[in-house]
Amino acid sequence: MRVIQHPLPQLPHPILSHSSPQEEDSEEEPKLKYERLANGVTEILLKDAASCITVHDKFLALGTHFGKVFLLDIQGNVTQKFEISPVKINQISLDEDGEHVGVCSEDGKVQVFGLYTREGFHENFDCPIKVVALHPQFSKSNKQFVTGGNKLLLYERNWLNRWKTSILHEGEGTITNIKWRANLIAWANNVGVKIYDISTKQRITNVLRDNVSLRPDMYPCSLCWKDNTTLIIGWGSSVKICAVKERDPTEMRDLPSRYVEIVSAFDTEFFLCGLAPLADQLVTLYYVKENSEHMEEEFRARPRLDIIQPLPESCEEISSDALTVRNFKDNECRDYRLEHSEGEPLFYIISPKDIVVAKERDQDDHIDWLLDKKKYEEALLAAEISFKNIKRHDVQKIGMAYINHLVENGDYDAAARKCQKVLGKNMELWENEVYRFKTIGQLKAISQYLPRGDLRLRPVIYEMILHEFLKTDYEGFAMLIREWPGELYNNMTIVQAVNDHLKKDPSNETLLKTLAELYTYDQRYDKALEIYLKLRHKDVYQLIHKHNLFSSIEDKIVLLMDFDKEMDRVVEELKDKPQLLHVYLHKLFKRDHHKGQRYHERQISLYAEYDRPNLLPFLRDSTHCPLEKALEICQQRNFVEETVFLLSRMGNCRRALQMIMEELGDVDKAIEFAKEQDDAELWEDLISYSIDKPPFITGLLNNIGTHVDPILLIHRIKEGMRIPNLRDSLVKILQDYNLQILLREGCKKILVADSLSLLQKMHRTQMRGIRVDEENICESCHATILPSDTAQAFGVVVFHCRHMFHKECLPSPGTIPGAQFCNICSAKRRGPGSGILEMKK
């Protein structure tokens, strides 16, 4: 239960606050909010006391103990005042249109008059008139009203414009309450509650009072129509909900056409002072007495306003508020009343010195409560949902409160994330928050959420954050450079800052990558390319192609070879730049002959076109080059040396030799070629071709001696042929021959010495003894080589290869007497044992 404390009366339209410690910690949101009806009402209640009030959608009518009636607007300002009687006003009634007023007082006066016409009714009775009720359609054609004193009287204006009086009920004590709805009049007297159908002029039912021990004047009955057929009765601590229903025509006989069914009946904890419907729930006003802690007697406590959910035989409490009305300790149950507005759900709690207005809490109140409970996320969501209709709440203000709360709790990331949602397009607030996050050392937290679209902060803000990251977090700095558009900050300022850091750490890959990105944005592609190549970065090809940087990579082409996985991409990118492609593939081939093997065929044409000096080395070193294709290209371009090489590689050595002799005319090269091939037929062809060419003969005589017998050449030389330097050539042949003889003799001496040394070594080795014990086995029968009884005679044969046999396990020596070999070594063709050791005993 909430305890509602009212502020000081001089404060206009205060919002009533609760002071219960239990309520302040409660997580259950209240259903109603309260404020004191002030302005003119405050002044009235200082001099007078409220006795009754009637509520219309447009205004209020307040009756006092000094016999006055005040018409008030909904803020409590007095619009009209009527002096009705010198004594207490008991009841005020209004029709639905709010054009006519019915008033009754304790001295028996009854007045019915129009607020906008002069027509009226005035009557003085000889007993107090407790209640008056106008027909709801009084302003139209139904000029009817009822009064309640010791009788229930119906007044009707006839066609002569005179008032006709009818007694509807009497004899059961004072009429204390009347409620008229459509054609049904409900009233309460000392015995119970009756309902009268004005259309059929029949009394429908009589609902008896439950607790007859309570004085009806001290604990009056409360009546309220929920709709045209549902009456709610509250009396003492009992509540009954009655439904007026149509009776089945077959059951009527002498019975009324309608009857009442009690659909819900239950008791409450306290005494009822008033009740009102709220959708399918009830708002109940209770008069509360509590036991004192120090005295045995009861004392009057604050009245309670509850919302309950009626059930058939009980009720469920939805909310409960204790109201601190003025002078509540002096009030009785009969001093409180509860009235409600049919249109807007407003509930008026009337006591002699106070009028409190209760209303359902709206979205603004819901947000206030969420903020009070520090449920900022829910408050912000609620404010956004109701943004179009919100009146008292600035969504941004709520959001700022939430951000402050998160910062105070150290949840900086969540606070920064909310900035994006709360601050929106307010750049001034954004900058203030950035500086606040800088003050608390949390610039990193807010960096991810800064504006970066059409609306943006001053460049210095972004630069400040980038410098902060550059000091402490290279990876975070790199991420911001990738994510932030370059227009947000001064690019050159950041480039200079990065270069300053690279002076301290020149090989830092993260900083180098980031610097390359900054250069790229600044269109300094050559610098970016240099960094990417140095780092072997995968984006280098994209940069080259996008910005046509082929001319910039000629001196850096070797760096591209570090991109093994991107080789195909490089070739594809350079296909329209054949000279660059050749440089790249040539460098690649020099580094590894096999890495670019699938491009060797293409390289033949590239070498032939741009780099012939390296064509022959390429053809020699490449094992993946298609020879037929290479031969075709070389023959087309008349590349003799390359063609000779290819012909020899393809096995056509005679044709190759022919090209050397005929097209090159180079005897030395022809001799060198013949030496390389070491083919007697080639030497024969060379001699045949050279026999009529003296210069060729000279070359052959000088070089042939070590490969071919010079006599063959000399015998074929024609007599009388003049051969240049013949004498020198012959001397060289003789010298070469003499040298060969010397070499052979030297080699022979070395061979004999080595053979003798090895023979002596073998003899010493074979003369050594061989250990035979129980662990050795016969290689034929695999039994232990030594018998278990060594006293008996046995024979063992041990070969120098260390294989051992029982003598009887060896085969017969055959036709060679005394010759015997190791079967195992003979089978493996490892040669026979060079001797036999035979053990006999």
Image: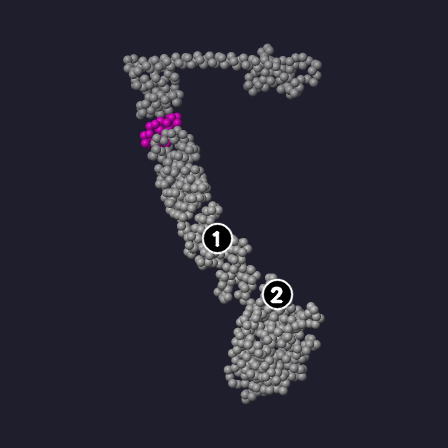
Relative placement, left or right, of 436 versus 835 is left
Q: Residue 490 at what x, y percent from top left?
A: 40, 50
Q: As rendered, which of 206 and 331 lies closer to the eye? A: 331
Relative placement, left or right, of 770 versus 517 is right
Which region of the structure is painted magenta?
Answer: 630-652
Residue 491, magenta (yes or no): no
Look at the image and tell me whether residue 153 can be seen.
no
806 relative to 74, above or below: above
Which disc, if any, is residue 20? Answer: 2
**Under tag 2, what secondary structure?**
loop
**Callout 1: few (<14), some (14-19), or many (20+) C-alpha neighbours within 10 Å?**
some
Relative placement, left or right, of 577 versus 254 is left
Q: As rendered, which of 588 and 510 lies closer to the eye? A: 510
Q: Quadrant of residue 815?
A: top right
Q: Quadrant of residue 679?
A: top left
Q: Quadrant of residue 10?
A: bottom right
**Disc 2 and disc 1: Cα gap in Å?**
41 Å
Q: Main secondary structure of the magenta part?
A: helix
Q: Which residue is mark 1?
A: 438
Q: Residue 399 at what x, y percent from top left?
A: 50, 59
